[in-house]
Image: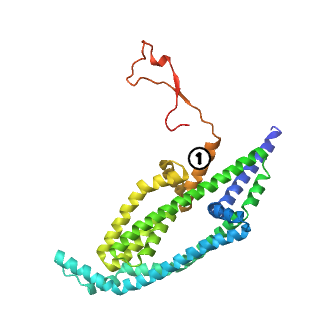
Amino acid sequence: MPRWLPRAVLLVLALVACFQLGSWAFHQLIGLLVNILIAFFLALAVEPAVARMAARGMRRGLATFLVFLGVFVAGAGFLALLGSMLAGQIVDMVEGFPHYLDTVIDWINRTFHTELSRLEIQDSLVHSDWLQKYVQNSASGVLDVSATVLGGLFRLLTVGLFSFYFAADGPRLRRALCSVLPPAKQSEVLRAWEIAVAKTGGYLYSRGLMALVSGVAHYVVFAVLGVPYAPALAVWVGLVSQFIPTIGTYLAGALPTLIAFTVDPWYAVYVLGFVVVYQQFENYVLQPKLTARTVDIHPAVAFGSVIAGTALLGAVGALIAIPAVATLQAFLGAYVKRYEVAGEAGDGDGGGAAGGEPTAARPRRVRLPGLR
């Protein structure tokens, strides 16, 4: 047996053990790493405001605290307003539900010549096996819901703390990162950092602008139909549909549809129809153009990046996919050299040039559209 064989076997076993240990540690820490990634992008989003306040002489820690305090107060005020509105509407809906049910049953009886009764329907529903199984499952899932809520609060606190530290110690973090790099690489890291701040801010600006347009459009419809709490519902639709990926559209449209039902069931149909139509307009007209302009990427690339981010990290990936891809594209565009394309130019009819000389014998360089 060669002398090197036992040493090679031990080396291979050690490498396999290190790989297994690293894989186990990565899977155990994947939640923390995702939280740090979210906190980093939140810090990039508030970086312009913090830097502007710090440039005026305010301490960076205090500036970061004031920015986060403003965001927290705005979010808490919106949730409090929405909670009070939702509680009042739920009470009204529960009190008026028998009247709505009687109206629907009367319409069904007149239209289809049936003899349905609300009391019989309620009695069959209360004594149904489906309802009893649902109540039992709901009672057994109370602890799971409580654990999920506590876990969400802990995750929110973790993201908030990390984002605060990243924003408050941004210059120190950049200096610590650049101190282990040679001078030639330091400028590239700083440039990538600036590009990330600009692209993340542009993405949030585009989302805020689309939320404003969506809120105004829905407010007009709610006001025309006489839906209660039209301003609060418009703000709800604008914010939730833009800043909660994937299911935000459904959550945004469900609440105003439900509240419009308390006024008139047909109003709920009108609101639902407008939400669906506006969502198609936003997806195919407004969002591709506005997102491509603010983050400077092609609409198809933006759509594909959202799909890829959702497949990798779920809702978090969908939220940070566009600014991440825009940052990568801008960074590569600054360092990748582009050349003119040498091609062949004809007269447009496929024939040769004047004098009988073929066009292909006189190649010249042309610049194709879309290439620099």
Quadrant where the image shows the N terminus: top right
- Residue 223 x %, y %: 37, 74
Tell me the crowding category of disc 1: few under 14, some 14 to 19, or many 20 or more residues within 10 angstroms, Cα based. Answer: some
Tell me the residue at 43%/56% (across/down).
286
Image location of residue 199, percent across then percent down? 59, 54
- For the residue pair 161 and 8, the one nearer the viewer reads as 161
Disc 1 target residue: 329
Tell whether 150 sits left or right of 134: right
Q: Is residue 290 left or right of residue 179?
A: left
Measured as percent of width and height from the top left, residue 7 is found at: 81, 44
Residue nearest the viewer, comparing 320 with 298: 298
Residue 112 can be seen in this image? yes
Residue 319 sits in which quadrant? bottom right
The answer to whether residue 307 is seen in the rendering is no
Task: Name the residue nearer the viewer: 144 or 213.
Answer: 213
Quadrant of the drawing holding the C terminus: top right
Q: Circle 1 — which element?
A: helix
Q: Tell me where residue 251 appears, x and y as whole percent.
A: 44, 69
- Reply above or below: 227 against 7: below
Q: How is the image coloured?
A: rainbow
Would you identify the image quadrant in which residue 131 lies? bottom left
Q: Residue furthest right?
A: 3
- Looking at the image, residue 287 sits to the left or right of residue 268; the answer is right
How many labels sit on residues? 1
The single residue placed furthest to the front in the displayed view is 56
Tell me the kind of residue under disc 1: Gln
Residue extending furthest top? 355
